[in-house]
Amino acid sequence: MDAAFIEEMEGELTSLQGEILKNFIAENEDFKKLVSGMDIKDLGDIAADDIMCRKMEALNQHETNRLRSIESALARLKNGRYGICLRCGKKIPVDRLRAIPYAVLCIECKSGEESGGKKQHA
Ligand SMILES: [Zn+2]
């Protein structure tokens, strides 16, 4: 995986993360109060904070799951495991990563999961 692609995906993930957090802040008065005392220049800090994540989860689990996936994708970018399927270890196609930068499963494993297979928390 080349450096330019990694950089591209890092940019995608970071802006996606920012978008989700901004929506959260815009839509949830409680959450707005929560972050109002914080320096939110770096929205990534919120997503990385476990306590914040739990509060967000109570408000919107779906979006929080997305944020967590983004977090782990960013971590995987740093440790060189990005783009490798969490379940089968095969490379996830670049097209899929461009469509869903936080994908952690290849299409086969993902469709297996959706058709009622045992859920693996990612
Ligand atoms: Zn797979």
Image (cartoon, grey):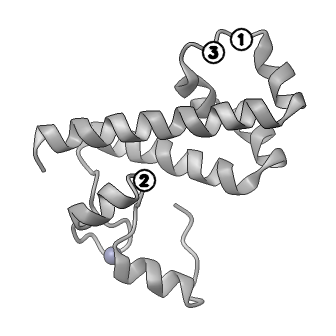
The residue sitting at 46% across, 84% down in the picture is: 111
Q: Which residue is mark 2?
A: 102
The residue sitting at 44% across, 77% down in the picture is: 110
The residue sitting at 71% across, 11% down in the picture is: 38
Q: In the image, 86: left or right of 62?
A: left
Three-letter code, disc 2: Tyr
- Image position, residue 113 (x, y; %): 52, 82
Farthest-out residue, right:
30
Do callouts 2 and 3 mark residues in contact (Cβ within 8 Å)? no
**As displayed, is residue 45 above or below residue 50?**
above
- Image position, residue 60 (x, y; %): 77, 50
Labels in figure, total: 3
Q: Which badge, 2 or 1, comes first in the chain's sequence?
A: 1
Q: In the image, 70: left or right of 38?
A: left
Rounded to the nearest angstrom, the CA distance separating label 2 from label 1 is: 26 Å
The secondary element bearing badge 2 is classed as loop
The secondary element bearing badge 1 is classed as loop
Q: Is mark 2 within 8 Å of ligand 1?
A: no
The residue sitting at 57% across, 65% down in the picture is: 121
The secondary element bearing badge 3 is classed as loop
Q: Which residue is mark 3?
A: 40
Rounded to the nearest angstrom, the CA distance separating label 2 from label 3 is: 22 Å
- Image position, residue 18 (x, y; %): 54, 32
Do callouts 3 and 1 mark residues in contact (Cβ within 8 Å)? yes
Q: Which residue is mark 1?
A: 38
